[in-house]
């Protein structure tokens, strides 16, 4: 029997995943505990996790955080702060944001380069929690930060001096500066306008407007242009300083409002959200985070596991970010001012990353915000003429490849977020159809599906090495093989949307195109491989040395066929061949012997080690779904083994991220995998099941989308030794499949697992696997 053979293989190599579980009785949450106390904002601030420790509220426009000289903001290993700036993105891989770094100093102002006037600090005098950051600078000044949605609030505690300064540096940011202006408006107010561009490559410029209001008048002020400081000047192009006498009152508070529309928008935001004391704002920010985190109540696990989990949940709610002002105005991608009516406009779209995990988590836990986010993406298409790929602020960067916006929007459709007034289901479909069937014109900043003409004509996107980029950003022609796989995935998801909306001819056409993944499969190697413009396979035959794949190899991309895993399994020789290849890919025998070591020494080879590997890379997006492939090959217990080993990479330390967070992508992977439900077909409504790491998780859900209002997931006794699913029950009824649909989730109150020390036959039948999309 197949089961007997499986059991013998498991017994031969099974050991515990001891690094993941410890469950002391005292670790459970109490009724009066604060979940925000479990969040460590410093996780991921070292070893290129690229997170930030500063102050923000959920999805806020402002992220007020220290910059230490690292190209994305804060690096835990550095010991000088150049300023506290307004805008940061969690886990991006290139410099972006960091607008208006502000730093308190004492004495005469003689330097205008923040790398030269930076202040030393140490972690022994630094703390952070959701919505709050504090540090003691070596200069004897204490700095505290908090935030509202559209303002950053600062409190500086100076020594007694008549030369206590606050420097506002408009000309230096994390991105490439284009221009800046600064104006002293009155004895308490400074206004700036900052235009910049950047993010991996130069892109179209964007502009932010700021207005900073201090709680008391300045005693002196000045501005600078370049290195020239002019005392008493009210305008400049570099920055400004304002001075206070702190001989008696040593604290200075300031509120800075941000707008992507105009100076009026910054003033509107300051009037709407400013005026409160620092402590009042801090309390409201902490309350906002407590309310958000309280929708997920996890019981079990040791303190470190719980801190890691809730820190990931926290980072999952940092982006996308509010883009509209308090009066509803926003700058669209046509660079015109628009009015958001009936929704909040959002911006910052790391879609190549987030479509795989974070968008699904938000649809589950924050559906109202997720709806507005989807509407915002539709608005981008209607106002600028095309859907986004990787958008920052008011502009397209064209970073990354493929067609990530399609599964992002089809997920919103499948989760029911686009129903209701506004006709957004059909509006989204029209935008997606245009995107799927065409290429943006030359005068559009977007590249869209850049290789779509060849894909539609030949069934694949060609890999054309050295082809000049027509527009700033990445090019699908540089990554033809992976672009083909991503186009095909998107076509599959669009086919399901077309069918649901009553467009059968379109559905059939897109479903046929979803099989295009087969066109880059090379039977001679048994792997996907790039093809050149003539159709010939090109590049090294060794799948670990692949060319034409974006941030990965053929080994890592071979499982990116969630729409048709049975078809992919057939291509590589059937279920046994697929399982053998999966075991090799995950170094499964080594994993069983030492999961944590395998994760850190076999799978992970550096923060940007994307190429020349034949093993799982849990740090990067192409592999995020791969552990769940075992659900489709009759070995669901191996999904648990791999997922739980990968979870050991998330720790409660500054190095505790696996790869870049990418606007919550990796954090959402951790959250979903920890509670035992994961979106195995991104863009559709299929949730794969694996063993949770907690005894019990209570989810509070929005009744508008989930009529039951709550879902409880239980796995009593889950541990390093008892980690294998024996049975599953939905509302008390036996459940044998390894997946749920969103429709089923909406009807449930409970999903109950029993666990044991050995794999069982649960979920091993062919009928239990997630179905292919037709």
Image (cartoon, rainbow, N blue to C red):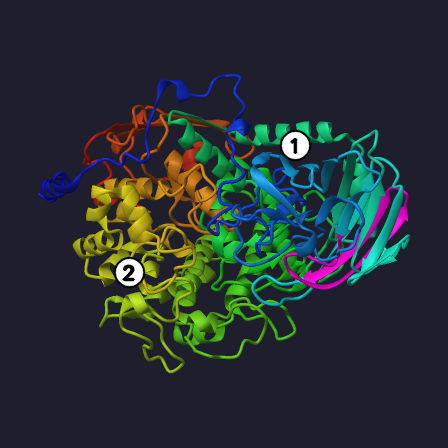
First reached walking from the N terminus: tag 2 or tag 1: 1
Q: Residue at x 37, y 71 (%)?
A: 547
**From which residue to which does the magenta span run?**
169-196
Q: Name the spot of residue 473 as percent of width and height, x first.
A: 56, 68
Q: How far is the residue under mark 2 from the one under mark 1?
A: 45 Å
Q: Name the spot of residue 379 as percent of width and height, x first.
A: 65, 55
Element under label 2?
loop
Q: Name the side, left or right, on which 23 lies relative to 80.
A: left
Element under label 1?
helix
Residue lying furthest bottom: 534
- Decide if residue 771 is in sight here: no
The quadrant of the picture occupied by the N terminus is top left
Is residue 530 shown above or below 364?
below
Q: Name the side, left or right, on which 137 lies relative to 503.
A: right
Is residue 298 shown above or below 219?
above
Residue placed most toward the observer, 234 or 663? 234
Q: Residue at x 45, y 21 (%)?
A: 29
Q: Name the spot of residue 580 as percent of width and height, x first.
A: 19, 54
User: Dot 1: few (<14), some (14–19), or many (≥20) neighbours within 10 Å?
Assistant: many
Residue 73 forms part of the magenta stretch: no
- Residue designated by label 1: 285
Q: Residue at x 51, y 30 (%)?
A: 701
Q: How many marks?
A: 2
The quadrant of the picture occupied by the C terminus is bottom left
Is residue 60 shown above or below 728?
below
Q: Name the side, left or right, on which 407 lies relative to 595.
A: right
Q: Main secondary structure of the magenta part?
A: strand
Q: Name the spot of residue 738 as percent of width and height, x first.
A: 30, 40
- Residue designated by label 2: 614
């Amino acid at each position: 029997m197949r089961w007997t053979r499986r059991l013998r293989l498991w017994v031969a190599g099974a050991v515990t995943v001891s690094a993941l579980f410890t469950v002391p009785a005292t670790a459970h949450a109490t009724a009066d505990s604060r979940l925000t106390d479990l969040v460590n904002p410093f996780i991921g601030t070292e070893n290129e996790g690229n997170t930030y420790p500063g102050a923000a509220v959920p999805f806020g426009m402002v992220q007020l955080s220290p910059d230490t000289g690292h190209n994305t903001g804060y690096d835990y290993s550095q010991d000088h702060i150049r300023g506290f700036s307004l805008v940061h993105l969690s886990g991006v891989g290139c410099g972006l944001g960091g607008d208006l770094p502000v730093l308190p100093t004492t004495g005469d102002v003689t330097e205008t380069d923040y790398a030269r006037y930076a202040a030393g600090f140490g972690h022994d005098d630094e703390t952070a929690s959701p919505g709050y950051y504090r540090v003691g600078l070596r200069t004897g000044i204490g700095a505290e930060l908090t935030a509202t949605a559209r303002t950053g609030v600062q409190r500086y505690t100076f020594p007694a001096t008549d030369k206590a300064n606050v420097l506002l540096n408009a000309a230096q940011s994390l991105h490439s500066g284009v221009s800046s202006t600064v104006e002293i408006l009155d004895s308490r107010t400074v206004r700036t306008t900052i235009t910049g561009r950047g993010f991996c490559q130069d892109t179209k410029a964007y502009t932010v407007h700021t207005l900073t209001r201090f709680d008391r008048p300045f005693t002196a002020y000045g501005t600078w242009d370049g290195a020239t400081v002019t005392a008493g000047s009210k305008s400049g192009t570099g920055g400004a300083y304002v001075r206070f006498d702190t001989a008696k009152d040593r604290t200075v508070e300031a509120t800075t409002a941000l707008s992507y529309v105009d100076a009026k928008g910054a003033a509107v935001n300051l009037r709407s959200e400013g005026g409160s004391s620092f402590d009042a704002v801090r309390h409201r920010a902490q309350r906002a985070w407590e309310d958000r985190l309280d929708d997920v109540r996890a019981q079990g696990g040791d303190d470190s596991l719980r801190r890691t989990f809730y820190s990931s949940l926290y980072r999952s709610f940092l982006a996308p970010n509010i883009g509209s002002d308090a009066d509803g105005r926003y700058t669209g991608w046509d660079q015109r001012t628009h009015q958001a009516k009936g929704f909040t406009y959002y911006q910052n779209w790391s879609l190549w990353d987030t479509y795989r995990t974070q968008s699904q988590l938000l649809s589950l836990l924050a559906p109202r915000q997720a709806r507005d986010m989807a509407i915002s993406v539709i608005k981008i298409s209607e106002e600028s003429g095309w859907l986004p790929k990787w958008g920052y602020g008011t502009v397209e960067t064209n970073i990354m490849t493929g067609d990530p916006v399609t599964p992002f929007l089809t997920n919103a459709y499948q989760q029911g977020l686009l129903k209701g007034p506004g006709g957004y289901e059909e509006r989204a479909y029209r935008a997606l159809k245009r995107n799927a069937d065409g290429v943006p014109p030359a005068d559009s900043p977007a590249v869209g599906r850049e290789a779509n003409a060849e894909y539609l004509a030949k069934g694949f996107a060609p890999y054309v090495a050295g082809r000049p980029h027509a527009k700033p950003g990445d090019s699908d022609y540089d990554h033809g093989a992976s672009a083909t796989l991503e186009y095909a995935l998107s076509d599959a998801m669009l086919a399901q949307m077309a069918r649901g909306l009553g467009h059968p001819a379109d559905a059939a056409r897109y479903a046929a195109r979803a099989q295009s993944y087969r066109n880059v499969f090379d039977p001679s190697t048994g792997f996907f491989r790039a093809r050149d413009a003539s159709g010939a396979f090109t590049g090294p035959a060794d799948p670990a040395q692949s060319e034409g794949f974006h941030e990965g190899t053929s080994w890592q991309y071979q499982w990116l066929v969630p729409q048709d895993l049975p078809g992919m399994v057939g291509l590589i020789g059937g279920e046994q061949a697929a399982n053998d290849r999966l075991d090799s890919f995950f170094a499964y025998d080594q994993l069983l012997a030492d999961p944590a070591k395998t994760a850190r020494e076999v799978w992970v080879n550096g923060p940007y080690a994307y190429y020349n590997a034949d093993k799982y890379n849990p740090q990067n997006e192409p592999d995020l779904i791969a552990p769940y492939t075992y659900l489709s090959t009759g070995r669901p217990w191996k999904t648990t083994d791999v997922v739980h080993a990968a979870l050991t990479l998330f720790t409660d330390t500054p190095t505790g991220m696996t790869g870049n967070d990418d606007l919550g992508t990796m954090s959402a992977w951790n959250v979903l995998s920890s509670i035992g439900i994961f979106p195995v077909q991104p863009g559709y409504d299929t949730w794969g099941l694996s063993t949770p790491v907690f005894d019990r998780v209570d989810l509070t859900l929005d009744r508008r989308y989930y009529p039951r209002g709550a879902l409880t997931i239980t796995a009593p006794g889950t541990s390093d030794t008892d980690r294998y699913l024996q049975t599953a029950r939905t509302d008390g009824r036996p459940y044998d499949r390894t997946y749920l649909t969103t429709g089923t989730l909406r009807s449930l109150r409970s999903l109950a697992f029993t666990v044991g020390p050995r794999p069982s036959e649960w979920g091993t039948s062919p009928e239990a696997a997630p179905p292919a999309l037709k």
